Image (cartoon, rainbow, N blue to C red):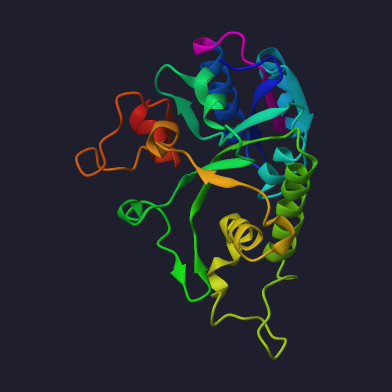
Amino acid sequence: MTKRNDGYLIVASKKYIFYAWACNLAEGIKDYYPEAQICIVTEERFCEDGRAAEVADHLIHCDNHYRAKLWGMAQSPFDRTMYIDADMEIWGEGIETCFDELGDNDMMFTGLPDDHWYVFNDEKFKGGEFKYCGAVCLYNSASAKVMEFMNEWYELYVKQYANEWWPLNEEGEHDYENFPKRLQIWDQFTLMWLTAHTDKYSDLKVSLFENGLKWNYWALFDRIRTPPPEDAVLLHLSCQGDKKLFG
């Protein structure tokens, strides 16, 4: 079971629909686990309806950056945090057990195995590969080193997205041969860089959920090719069409 200082963090920026989805997810968590502590990070302009304030134990205002989620993850008021993308829904019982998965890990993600790439971004490249999906992240937010990582993940991604940072080759130029420019839009690239190519964070223990589909089952999955586990908790509705399909 979770402790009192454990909580769930959801971020919604740029579009009102993300805010509406975030509130829907928060309400779903409370339906299954009324004692849950929830933090919603969103733009102040979306909050006039009072819905977020009603369901959230903590409400933090962010700007409209494309990846304000990374900034929000660094603002967690909890000791252990389960970050969940706003475009997800509670699909079954068990959300309160997620913190039992953390153990002595600093961060945990769901994975991007080869046999799931028919719905994910098929990204292996000369310099590495995407191992972690950023839709769900369980992390020890009481750790100063982890929170430093979260802040740097956001700050480096902002530079990456603005074309102000990219890995360099021996000639001091952007190394697009090993790290293709098409990866520039993905915060997964920044995550890959910090976890696989940065000595500063080499002592952090980053792991995968043993059963990633339980915590991040994509609506786009083929149910025969990739059947959902019986104990699936979170359904990832990765686009508006999925949300219409699943109601």
Task: From the viewer's side, name the closer residue of 43 and 216.
Answer: 216
Task: From the viewer's side, name the closer residue of 127 and 34.
Answer: 127
Magenta stretch: includes residue 236: no
Q: Residue at x 63, y 34 (%)?
A: 16
> Which x, y percent locates residue 41?
71, 32
Pick out the residue farthest to the bottom. Answer: 171
Q: Residue at x 55, y 67 (%)?
A: 183
Magenta stretch: includes residue 37: yes
Residue 156 is left or right of residue 24, and the answer is right
Q: Residue at x 78, y 47 (%)?
A: 148
Say above or below: 125 vs 1: below
Residue 92 is left or right of residue 171, and the answer is left
Pick out the residue farthest to the left. Answer: 224
- Quadrant assignment, res 167: bottom right
Say above or below: 148 vs 130: above
> Which x, y percent locates residue 178?
54, 78
Q: Quadrant of the N terminus?
A: top right
Residue 221 is left or right of residue 132, and the answer is left
> Which x, y percent locates residue 174?
66, 81
Task: From the viewer's side, name the closer residue of 91 and 2.
Answer: 2
Magenta span = 31-42
Q: Residue at x 49, y 59 (%)?
A: 130
Pick out the residue farthest to the top. Answer: 34
